[in-house]
Amino acid sequence: MVFTSCTKEDGAVPDSGMYKPTLVDPEDIFPKEFGMPLLPKDNPFTEEGIQLGRMLFYDPILSIDSSISCGSCHQQEYAFAEPFDKSFGFLGLRSSRNAMPLFNLAYHHSYFWDTRVKTLRELVFEPIQAHNEMAMTLPTLRERLKRNKRYVDYFNKAFNHEPNLHDMSLAMEQFLLSIVSKDSRFNQFFPGDNLQVLSQSELRGAFIFNGLVEFDANGKTKGADCFHCHGGELAQQLNASMGGVASNGLDPEPVDLGVGGITNQNQDMGTFKAPSLLNIAVTAPYMHDGRFKTLEEVINHYSEGVHFENPNIHPQMAAHGGQQLNLTQQQKEDLLAFLRSMTDSSFLVNPAYANPF
Ligand code: HEC
Ligand code: HEC
């Protein structure tokens, strides 16, 4: 990294103008195929800001007893999710939901299973202060960062300031926005003209996933319509009303209220953000409560376990007249093979996102 020292003119302002952070062009972060996401205008990417955000993400001093970092529950080898149904936070207390994977967040319009937060700079304060996650208080955190020589140095390099919590949240926002997963075989195949990238079984799975399947002799569909809510190159519907937020019929009646717990609207009860299926093979267990241990269990749910009686089930789930899909064993295997082609193994070891300590 290159830091340009400014000339004496800037010396008039005590702790500003000493450093000029190096701007990073968003086109170097986001792949053309994904398009350019809507980025916060007041928080441009800089090498120093992203690096500081990465340090903070992996630093346990953000928790009250310096035992837990963001990276404790969001582990790179699991696409920044973790292999537990509920997380272990401060004193081993459990979170109420399954930790979510973190990548391509710049394309999302809202965060958490219940979509309760709209920006990443706001989001970071939730886990930091949650009693069952990092249990930190903000005044303590501010003092801790201000007394830490390394952070005094890095905040100055990134923001020309001594550490403060606003800049902390901006640095973490930069790092989180910069995490991109784009190299799975599914992504090389997308939008479907690169057929040789997938095996025959994976290709058949792609057809099932996209509902491009014939009807059988009884007029029953033989395909699933996963693409409605998990379609496109991000394997995720971003439009909330199109299936980006939905009930996929896990329970006869809402248990965890999900989005309804935030909006208090009947139609939102038991609806959740539809996650991306990129890297889905490494983020078990599945769903907001981690109820399914394997992708086979997930596929069985969609094939024959959907609770159509759930009052808020999304219309796309009931697209086939509210009938279970009853996929054949071969179709299930093909669908599974296709889901596994969505793993981006280079992402899971990309040094740009790894623990810097
Ligand atoms: C104790 C475990 C734990 C820790 C520590 C933790 N998280 Fe999380 N994270 C979770 C859980 C659980 C969820 C889902 C919570 C929910 O939806 O209510 C989540 C959700 C998220 C999401 C939402 C992703 C999406 O697609 O909507 C982001 C972003 C995130 N965490 C970032 C962070 C950052 C940054 C930190 C550190 C400041 C952090 N997390 C610390 C467990 C943790
Ligand atoms: C109507 C929208 C919709 C359709 C159609 C749909 N899903 Fe989902 N999917 C969701 C939602 C919403 C969730 C999160 C539900 C929750 O946790 O309560 C989800 C969760 C998942 C998960 C778990 C993700 C994770 O990170 O835990 C997998 C895997 C999955 N879906 C696969 C599929 C497959 C395969 C199909 C087609 C057979 C499909 N989905 C069809 C909306 C949908």
Image: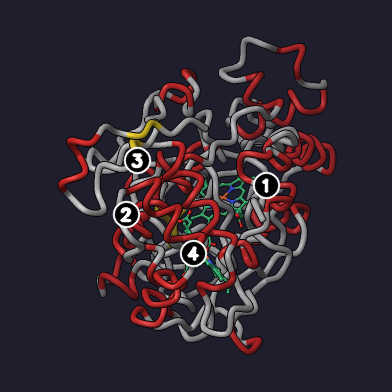
290 to the left or right of 259: right
Quickly name the residue at label 3.
Answer: 19
Question: Separation of disc 4 and disc 2 at Cα?
Answer: 29 Å
Quickly name the residue at label 2.
Answer: 119
For marks 3 and 1, the one nearer the N-term is 3
Identify the mark at residue 280; answer none if there is no mark: 1
Question: Separation of disc 4 and disc 3 at Cα?
Answer: 17 Å
Question: Separation of disc 3 and disc 1 at Cα?
Answer: 41 Å
Q: Residues within 10 Å of mark 2 (few under 14, many from 20)?
A: some
Label 2 amino acid? Thr
For marks 4 and 2, the one nearer the N-term is 2
Task: Nearest to the eye among marks 2 and 1: give it.
Answer: 2
Question: Separation of disc 2 and disc 3 at Cα?
Answer: 27 Å
Residue ID at (42%, 22%): 27
Task: Nearest to the eye among marks 3 and 1: give it.
Answer: 3
> Residue 37 appears at what percent x and percent y?
36, 32
Is ligand 2 less than 8 Å from the beta carbon at label 1? Answer: yes
Res 294 → quadrant: bottom right
Answer whether labels 3 and 1 touch (C-beta < 8 Å). Answer: no
For marks 2 and 3, the one nearer the N-term is 3
248 to the left or right of 203: left
Q: Is residue 246 above or below residue 349?
A: below
For marks 4 and 3, the one nearer the N-term is 3
Residue ID at (41%, 76%): 141
Identify the mark at residue 149; answer none if there is no mark: 4
